[in-house]
Image: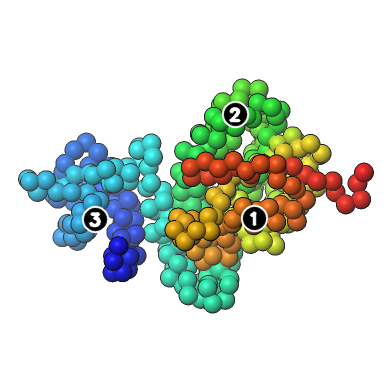
Amino acid sequence: MTFMRLLWPGALTVQAIYTAARLEIADHLATGPKSLGELFTSTSANKKTLERLLQALASIGMFSKDDGGKFQNTALSELLRKDHPGSMRPWALMLGASFVWKPMGELHDAVVTGTASFNQIFSTHFFDYLASHPEDAEIFNRAMAAQSTNFMEELARFYDFSRFSNLVDLGGGTGENLARILETNSTLKGVLFDLPEVIEQVKSSLVTRFNGRLTLASGNFFDTVPGHQDCYMMVRVIHDWADEDAVKILQKCREAMDSGTTLLLVETILDQRSESPQAMMDMLMLVLLGSMERSEENFRELLQKGGFEIIRVIKEPGFSMIESRPVPLSGSA
């Protein structure tokens, strides 16, 4: 790959795909090729600039034009459809949104200062911003749900949750991950725990679907978490926090847990090799949250400081499961 291929068109590609996602062009083309006039009628875009956008995206394989001059989906643009089972539309909408691209544009400052550029631009922490900007929070939550869909289905199949009676999903969002596990474990009961404003978004149909096996609990895991359950799970939570805060979360978990309890962290483990695909995600975590992706040794150190020891690490394509157990609290027998 040449240097210019890496550099150009860069951010313009993200913004072009983002614009197509917002205009729902892939959905308009779902039934077959459409002329520019038909797409113009279906969108709110200027006809001439819409054509320029489609030509630009066709140049990178996102949409194509047939011999009759009609535009059609490609294998890439199919992933922008709302109804595609592996839809990447939520990620296109998030990565192109201003609350993400503005901090990315200040990566230099984040690298120099070692702090999140998001905080400097918006004068608040990322999650506090989302709490007061529900539209952006919805964009973020949908992207996170789309990311976890495939690997959570795999996790629910291969990991033996049947040995537990109760599972707490800490920072579990609106419950999609916990629901997948409960679907494949008919005797398991689950507690969905997140901030009050997140729990308020949980659909009542999700709770009723499991006939009393799924309950809701709201709070802040820096203050307290539900106690005396036999398994606790956090899916892509710890990577959202710098080391000091991550240790605080783990310590709060340890305080709530009995001996013999299991803690499961579902994370991406950073490979230290130079070609590691997680390395660029690490830059996104820096600018948005001042946090990081971590190696297995990093997780081991965090868990030890938080009061845990690792039992095993299960590595699967796209994610890893870190299974740990609490060590005796200081002063306990």
Q: How many labels sit on residues?
A: 3
Query: Which residue lies at the image location 50% right of the left edge and 34% below the top edge?
Result: 153
Q: Position of residue 109 (x, y in %)?
A: 51, 76
Q: Quadrant of residue 232?
A: top right
Whole-number angstrom distance, CA of label 3 to CA of label 1:
39 Å
Question: Element at badge 3?
Answer: loop
Q: Specify the label residue 297 is tagged with.
A: 1
Q: Which residue is mark 2?
A: 182
Using the rendered image of the protein, determine whether residue 9 is visible from the camera's viewpoint.
no
Q: Position of residue 4 (x, y in %)?
A: 28, 69
Q: Specify the label residue 76 is tagged with.
A: none
In this rendering, the answer to whether 237 lies above or below 152 is below
Compare marks 2 and 1 and give the one earlier in the sequence.
2
Query: Which residue lies at the image location 49% right of the left edge and 52% below the top edge?
Result: 140
Viewed as shown, does residue 307 lie left or right of 36?
A: right
Whole-number angstrom distance, CA of label 2 to CA of label 3:
41 Å
Q: Position of residue 175 (x, y in %)?
A: 57, 38
Amino acid found under the numbered disc labelled 1: Glu
Q: Which residue is mark 3?
A: 60
Question: Element at badge 1?
Answer: helix
Residue at the limit of the structure toward the front, as seen here:
273
**In front: mark 3 or mark 1?**
1
Figure quadrant of the C terminus: top right
Q: Are marks 2 and 3 in contact (CB under 8 Å)?
A: no
| Front in this rendered view, residue 73 or 299 | 299
Q: Quadrant of residue 262?
A: top right
Query: Which residue lies at the image location 55% right of the left edge and 35% below the top edge?
Result: 155
Q: Residues within 10 Å of mark 1 (few under 14, many from 20)?
A: few
Amino acid found under the numbered disc labelled 2: Leu
Q: Are marks 3 and 1 in contact (CB under 8 Å)?
A: no
